[in-house]
Image (spheres, rainbow, N blue to C red):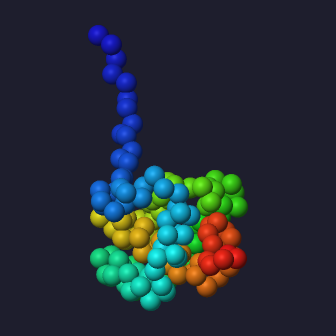
């Protein structure tokens, strides 16, 4: 009789079931941000950020600006360590990076059903910042207008 091997439980991979996310999952994240910049203005983006965060837990709603700052720092650290390339990363890979980020510091607050909201809200925030800050546009490889 063969001995049973100890198996470690498989890590559950979280994948979005959102129809809109499935359409953009294989696009690069910079293309997604570029599309947001081209098609929408700052007011539309900020309205939709508010709409997305209203589905998140109250603690995250109250400190969403801080969460965004932490996520930006997390992205910058990953970028500087050459673990991600913000010009070529796909949306589904960025979704995984956001899950990794939420598991590091905000594990108690985020649940599977909040990751879609986090993805879209943070994308709208990044697009809003890219509208006004050229260094961010360069970081993500997007252009605003004729000369970037």
Nearer-the-camera pick, 28 or 11: 28
* Image point (42%, 58%), residue name: 24
Q: Position of residue 36 (x, y in %)?
A: 48, 73
Q: Disc count in the image?
A: 0
* Image point (48%, 56%), residue name: 27
* Residue 106 occupies quadrant: bottom left
Nearer-the-camera pick, 40 or 75: 40
Residue at the limit of the structure toward the bottom, as seen here:
43
When the figure is inspected, residue 41 is found, relative to residue 72, above or below; the finding is below
When the figure is inspected, residue 132 is found, relative to residue 38, above or below; the finding is below
Q: Quadrant of the C terminus?
A: bottom right
Q: Quadrant of the N terminus?
A: top left
When the figure is inspected, residue 105 is found, relative to residue 146, above or below; the finding is above
Residue at the limit of the structure toward the top, as seen here:
1
Can residue 41 be seen at all in this image of the molecule? yes
* Image point (53%, 57%), residue name: 28
Q: Position of residue 68 (x, y in %)?
A: 51, 77
Can residue 57 be seen at all in this image of the molecule? no
Residue at the limit of the structure toward the front, as seen here:
146
Q: Position of residue 48 (x, y in %)?
A: 38, 81
Q: Position of residue 79 (x, y in %)?
A: 66, 61
* Image point (58%, 82%), residue name: 131
């Amino acid at each position: 009789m063969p001995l049973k091997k100890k198996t470690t439980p498989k890590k559950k991979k979280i994948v979005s079931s959102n129809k809109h996310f499935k359409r953009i999952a294989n696009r690069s994240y910079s293309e997604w941000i570029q599309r947001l910049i081209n098609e929408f203005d700052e007011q539309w983006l900020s309205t939709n950020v508010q709409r997305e965060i209203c589905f998140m837990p109250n603690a995250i709603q109250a400190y969403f600006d801080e969460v965004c700052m932490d996520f930006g720092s997390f992205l910058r650290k990953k970028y500087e360590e050459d673990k991600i390339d913000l010009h070529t990363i796909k949306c589904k890979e960025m979704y995984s990076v956001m899950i990794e980020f939420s598991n590091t510091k905000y594990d108690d607050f985020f649940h599977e059903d909040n990751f879609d909201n986090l993805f879209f809200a943070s994308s709208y925030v990044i697009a809003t910042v890219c509208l006004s800050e050229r260094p961010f546009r360069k970081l993500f490889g997007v252009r605003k207008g004729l000369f970037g």
